[in-house]
Image: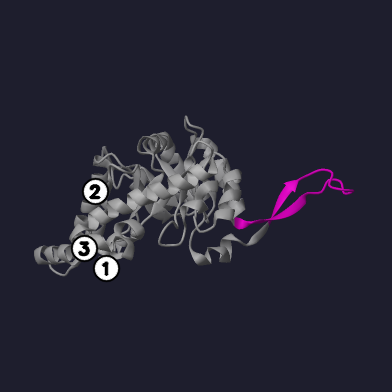
Amino acid sequence: MIDKLIEKIQKTKAPIVVGLDPMLKFIPDSILKQAFLEKGETLEGAAEAVWQFNKAIIDRIADLIPAVKPQIAMYEQFGVPGLCAFQKTVTYCKEKGLIVIGDIKRGDIGSTSSAYATAHLGKVKVGSNFCTVFDEDFVTVNPYLGSDGVQPFIDVCKEEKKGIFILVKTSNPSSGEFQDQLVKSGVTAGVVGEQTGKIAFADKTLYETVGEKVAEWSTQCMGAYGYSSIGAVVGATYPEQGKILRKVMPHSFILVPGYGAQGGTGKDLVHFFDKNRLGAIVNSSRGIIAAYQSEKYAQFGPEHFADASRQAVIDMIADIDQALECME
């Protein structure tokens, strides 16, 4: 699957992914009113508004980008109708030729992790049939339960030719409370100074330790372009850490959240990419889908919200392109 994503990036010349993270406050009143008129001020009405909002944006940006990233929590908050909107969104995006990264951040152990992987990447056996469920191309995975929680996803990836992005250094302000903590790691054995037969220990951050594990896992799903379908999530808001992790994980594609609304800019991203402008895909969510609400794109107004999203995508592509040109 990573080869397919890389080829889409090369075709569009846009190493970006649009986060489809709808909230009712982002949706224009005209869409909300129509959805509530049809289905009432209910969960069904909210889900219908989300679907119509997503569809309008997808129709205006699908030709510009390689991928989208729906965040499942924004749909789950509306219960089963919201999950139906999530599935309709995934299906519609794939019909439009887009790669779909399901932002689900799942991670558990044993059969539970296998069930998550099956639901989002694989097929579930029902009687004599094998049925796909949400059928994303990639999903995000939380690794903090260890290999027991990640390996079931990798197994499904190998079977279904799908991919995952593992949380390593996330973009949120408090990520350092755990991810930046120093941990001791054995780095060598044998002769250490004047001591013999001892293991030397060095302090490194937890995110580096996780990155090293991702690099190890990545060898299981290598693609033709030198990258693995086992990727990593590293926030644009931490460019120096991104520089470190790019070296730690040379074969892992990096999903980079935190651009735009969270403060990340094109110049913060250069170290996530390789000399061929590959190796990373940058996410923007509300900066794109709610662009019409910002001062920069206010001239579009609520009635042309999807056109505002299109312009925001064009501007994001130009910003990243300019930053990568400066790197060369």
Q: Amino acid at mark 1?
A: Lys
Residue 7 vs 106, above or below: the answer is: above
Sequence-first tag of 3 and 2: 2
Q: Amino acid at mark 2?
A: Arg
Q: Residue furthest top?
A: 224
Rendered residue at 58%/54% (across/down):
241
> Does residue 250 appear left or right of residue 78 in this picture?
right
Is residue 164 found inside the magenta-colored segment of the image? Answer: no
Residue labelled with disc 2: 60
**Residue at 40% from the left image edge and 62% from the top image edge:** 261
Can residue 139 be seen here? The reply is: no
Crowdedness near tag 3: few (<14), some (14–19) or many (≥20) residues, C-alpha within 10 Å: many
Q: Secondary structure at mark 3?
A: helix
**Callout 1 crowding tier (Cα within 10 Å): few <14, some 14–19, many ≥20:** few
The answer to if 196 sits in the magenta stretch is yes
Which of discs 1 and 2 lies nearer the camera? The answer is 2
Identify residue type, mark 3. Answer: Pro
Foreground residue, 218 or 254? 254
Determine contact: label 1, label 3, CB under 8 Å.
Answer: no
Circle 2 packing at 10 Å, graded few (<14), some (14-19), many (20+), is some
From the top left corner, tell me how far across and down residue 204 is, in percent. Answer: 67, 55
Q: Give the residues drawn in magenta, as a range.
A: 184-206
Q: Residue furthest right?
A: 194
- Cα distance, mark 3 to mark 2? 15 Å
Q: Nearer the viewer, mark 1 or mark 3?
A: 3
**Is 57 in front, or is 203?**
57
**Residue position for label 3:** 302
Q: Secondary structure at mark 2?
A: helix
Residue 25 marker? 1
